[in-house]
Image (cartoon, rainbow, N blue to C red):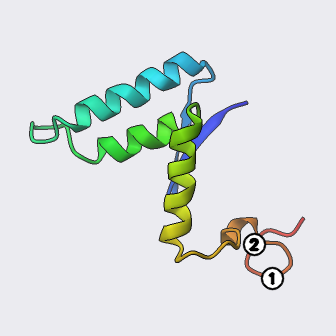
């Protein structure tokens, strides 16, 4: 099953091989802490955590809690997953 990260209108496919995904996540976090250097940036840390959240349950829980907090504590699905209210795709 292909893993995809969606950020706004952009989407990125991740490798199917779990150790490769974990290596990418760890490298993003390490390089993110070097964000004061040119080309690297602190934006890499949260992106690395999102990549790791596909394989590490604890990080996945943090991501889900953050998404709930970001939406203001609402437990309703995002608009693209809603059915029948006219805003999402119809099944």
Residue at the limit of the structure toward the right, as seen here: 91
Vertical relation: 85 (above or below) 29: below
Question: Mark 1 Cα within 10 Å, few/some/many (few <14, many 20+)?
Answer: few
Residue at the image point whose x is 33% and y is 26% from the top: 27
Residue at the image point whose x is 56% and y is 35% from the top: 13
Q: Nearer the viewer, residue 86 or 49?
A: 49
Vertical relation: 82 (above or below) 67: below
* The C terminus sits in image quarter: bottom right
Q: Secondary structure at mark 1?
A: loop
Residue at the image point whose x is 77% and y is 71% from the top: 82
**Residue labelled with disc 1:** 85
Residue 65 % position (x, y) = 54, 59
Residue 33 % position (x, y) = 20, 37
| Left or right placement of residue 36 versus residue 17 in this view | left
Q: Nearer the viewer, residue 75 or 35?
A: 75
**Residue labelled with disc 2:** 88
Q: Secondary structure at mark 2?
A: loop
Q: Are marks 2 and 1 in contact (CB under 8 Å)?
A: yes
Question: Mark 2 Cα within 10 Å, few/some/many (few <14, many 20+)?
Answer: few
| Left or right placement of residue 62 versus residue 40 in this view | right
Residue at the limit of the structure toward the front, as seen here: 58
* Residue 46 visible to an observer of this rendering: yes
Residue 45 % position (x, y) = 32, 42
- Report the Cα–Cα distance between label 2 and label 1: 7 Å
Q: Nearer the viewer, residue 55 or 42?
A: 55
Residue at the image point whose x is 79% and y is 82% from the top: 86
Question: How many circles with numbers are drawn on the protein?
Answer: 2
| Left or right placement of residue 35 versus residue 53 in this view | left
| Left or right placement of residue 90 versus residue 16 in this view | right
* Residue 8 visible to an observer of this rendering: no
* The N terminus sits in image quarter: top right
């Amino acid at each position: 099953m292909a893993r995809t990260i969606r950020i706004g209108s952009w989407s990125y496919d991740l490798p199917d091989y779990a150790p490769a995904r974990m290596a990418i996540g760890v490298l993003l976090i390490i390089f993110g802490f070097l964000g004061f250097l040119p080309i690297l940036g602190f934006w890499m840390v949260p992106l690395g955590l999102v990549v790791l959240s596909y394989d590490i349950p604890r990080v996945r829980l943090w991501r889900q809690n953050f998404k709930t907090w970001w939406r203001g504590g609402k437990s309703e699905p995002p608009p693209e997953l809603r059915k029948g209210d006219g805003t999402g795709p119809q099944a």
